[in-house]
Image (cartoon, rainbow, N blue to C red):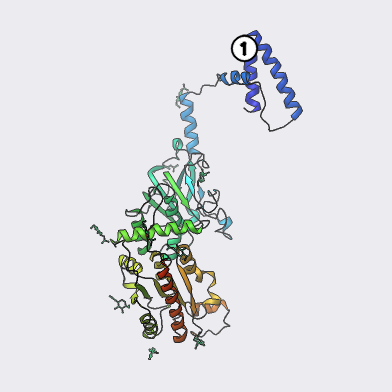
Amino acid sequence: MTKRSVSRRLVTCLASPKFSLNVLCLVVTVFVLLQIWSFHITQQPILLPPSLFTYLKEQQHEPEQIISENETAYLVEKLRESVTFLPLKDLRFSNKPLEGHTWFMSSLYDNQTKGEVQYQEFPSESSKGRLLCLKGVDEHDGSWNYYALAWPQALPVNASLQEGLTFVSYNHYSYGNMWHGLSAMVPFVAWSLRNQCESPQRWVLYHWGELRFKMGNWLSEIITATYGQNNVFLRFVDENKPVCFHKAVVMRHNEGGMSRERRMEVFDLIRCKARKYCNISLSQTSKSRIGMTLLMRTGPRSFKNESAVIDVFKRECKRVEGCELKVSYSNNLTFCEQVELMKMTDVLVSPHGAQLTNLVLMDRNSSVMEFLPKGWRKLAGVGQLVYQWGASWSGMRHEGSWHDPDGEICQFPDTDRRCMSVYKNGRIGYNETYFGEWAKSVLGKFREKKMENVVGRNHSYGSLDGCRC
Ligand SMILES: *[C@@H]1O[C@H](CO)[C@@H](O)[C@H](O)[C@H]1NC(C)=O
Ligand SMILES: *[C@@H]1O[C@H](CO)[C@@H](O)[C@H](O)[C@H]1NC(C)=O
Ligand SMILES: *[C@@H]1O[C@H](CO)[C@@H](O)[C@H](O)[C@H]1NC(C)=O
Ligand SMILES: *[C@@H]1O[C@H](CO)[C@@H](O)[C@H](O)[C@H]1NC(C)=O
Ligand SMILES: *[C@@H]1O[C@H](CO)[C@@H](O)[C@H](O)[C@H]1NC(C)=O
Ligand SMILES: *[C@@H]1O[C@H](CO)[C@@H](O)[C@H](O)[C@H]1NC(C)=O
Ligand SMILES: *[C@@H]1O[C@H](CO)[C@@H](O)[C@H](O)[C@H]1NC(C)=O
Ligand SMILES: *[C@@H]1O[C@H](CO)[C@@H](O)[C@H](O)[C@H]1NC(C)=O
Ligand SMILES: *[C@@H]1O[C@H](CO)[C@@H](O)[C@H](O)[C@H]1NC(C)=O
């Protein structure tokens, strides 16, 4: 009981018709006053004799002012009108758009639990039961799209309500890029894994607060496979008509905050769901077989002399018992062909590029060998490490990257940022000795592991309730 409610009840008690009780109340009142006085502004609860405490608690009939129905309707109307929409993109934080509460829905904070995905859910305790409402149709400037919180009994004027679960995604990069798109989806799958595999009725996609209506094809198939239904990307039609959501989950930190275990869980589920979706047998492949795949690119970051590269790996593969080499081009494989190819791949050999995102679809503990053109090591920043991270998150082994020492000539010094535009789309050469030794060592290690039976042939996916694959 707070002090205020105790005193209120004591006053009621004093007014009691029973004289004996009046006296008792008076004594207790003095006692309480003394306690308050002596402890001044102590936060401790006030100690009362238990019988009196029970009596006071029963005295609940405080004369409440009765609000007429008319007045309630009036107040609800005022409440509806007072719902305030704020810009989705807060320009005050444009110098640190990804930090903390970010510049997207900057007035709200995420639910952060160590090792778990950072998310917001509406309605929730922290939203005090309010729903999320969105407004605006802008595809070019996120500060012209808006968000607000509103109680379900007092939705903003002209608002419509969307039933079911809605996923609201913030992606700082493009949904068209396999890797960046996948990073934006990972936290949703992680959330579903912890919430009885609940799947969304629809998605709202934002990039810098600007609306987006599609994802890349590969990603779209991954999500369709994972949730077993076609994706619906919400389009707002009228900029004056807010849309509120019965239940919404908002992600704006990608996989940030998630532990390695949580990330691996997500990729285990995605991998298994993708194989099921493509009707690929989940049975194990032969133990004695080692699949080595050269996943080629065309154009930027392709190998300059493909036949020479293929020859090196073909030679090394031949030297290992059970090794089978496949050469494929990512650009002309369907989604399911990629899923199937990755199931057969134990060692993935591929230049740096979006097609490498497929690595998450291999069996766990498989190996990745990556190749980059000249100039990237010094100039490409941490972004060049995404597939090393991807391998780690999905339980693969990144066996290193080869940086081509030769390539395009840049007129500025090697470390000059202006050179990146020269190197960005460079192609990749080869070093026969290096490639040969590297392939030999990776295949050798892999064979040993396979003998020890630690390669992830077993499908222990989706051990979580309601989310079995
Ligand atoms: C209820 O509201 C209506 C319209 O706002 C008003 O005309 C009427 O007098 C109100 N009645 C009472 C009892 O307050
Ligand atoms: C945050 O998430 C945890 C579970 O991960 C949940 O128990 C808690 O209620 C959430 N807090 C809020 C404020 O939503
Ligand atoms: C509600 O919609 C009507 C009709 O489209 C429009 O005239 C009115 O301005 C809207 N009200 C608000 C507060 O947007
Ligand atoms: C998988 O099999 C089911 C049922 O046989 C079929 O409806 C579906 O189209 C198949 N999917 C693919 C990707 O082949
Ligand atoms: C590619 O490499 C092979 C083997 O080293 C060589 O014979 C061939 O001429 C090269 N092709 C080109 C186009 O450079
Ligand atoms: C796939 O693409 C590569 C290079 O673009 C081409 O050489 C190959 O013939 C294509 N394969 C099929 C089956 O279309
Ligand atoms: C090729 O790789 C080998 C082994 O790492 C190295 O000794 C050699 O210098 C490299 N050759 C060139 C031309 O870079
Ligand atoms: C992967 O390898 C590690 C260590 O080599 C092993 O502990 C783990 O069980 C393997 N994972 C799977 C899924 O086989
Ligand atoms: C695979 O899983 C099954 C049952 O889950 C188990 O009996 C078997 O020993 C596992 N095999 C390996 C290689 O871990």
Residue 336 vertical position relative to residue 312 in the rendered view, above or below: above
Residue 413 picture quarter: bottom right
Nearer to the camera, 315 or 271: 315
Q: Is residue 62 visible?
A: no
Q: Which quadrant contains ligand 8?
A: bottom left
- The residue located at (42%, 78%) in the rendering is 300
Residue 179 picture quarter: bottom left
Q: Circle 1 sits in a helix, a strand or a loop, which is it?
A: loop
Disc 1: CA contacts within 10 A as few (<14), some (14-19) or many (>=20) = few
- The residue located at (59%, 18%) in the rendering is 55
- Some atom of ligand 1 lies within 8 Å of the CB belonging to the residue at label 1: no
Task: Name, please, the residue furthest toward the front.
Answer: 452
Q: On the rendered image, what quadrant is the C terminus found in?
A: bottom left
Residue 177 vertical position relative to residue 375 in the rendered view, above or below: above
User: How many numbered dots are placed on residues in this image?
Assistant: 1
Residue 68 at x, y = what percent?
48, 23
- Residue at the disc numbered 1: 16
Nearer to the camera, 60 or 416: 60
Q: Is residue 114 visible?
A: yes
Nearer to the camera, 371 or 465: 465
| Relative horizontal placement of residue 39, taking residue 95 as reference (left or right) | right
Residue 214 at x, y = what percent?
37, 59
Residue 190 vertical position relative to residue 350 in the rendered view, above or below: above
Nearer to the camera, 282 or 122: 282
Residue 118 at x, y = what percent?
51, 52
- The residue located at (54%, 71%) in the rendering is 381
Residue 276 vertical position relative to residue 45 in the rendered view, above or below: below
Q: On the rendered image, what quadrant is the N terminus found in?
A: top right
| Relative horizontal placement of residue 441, taking residue 328 as reference (left or right) | right
Amino acid carrying label 1: it is Ser
Residue 51 at x, y = what percent?
62, 18
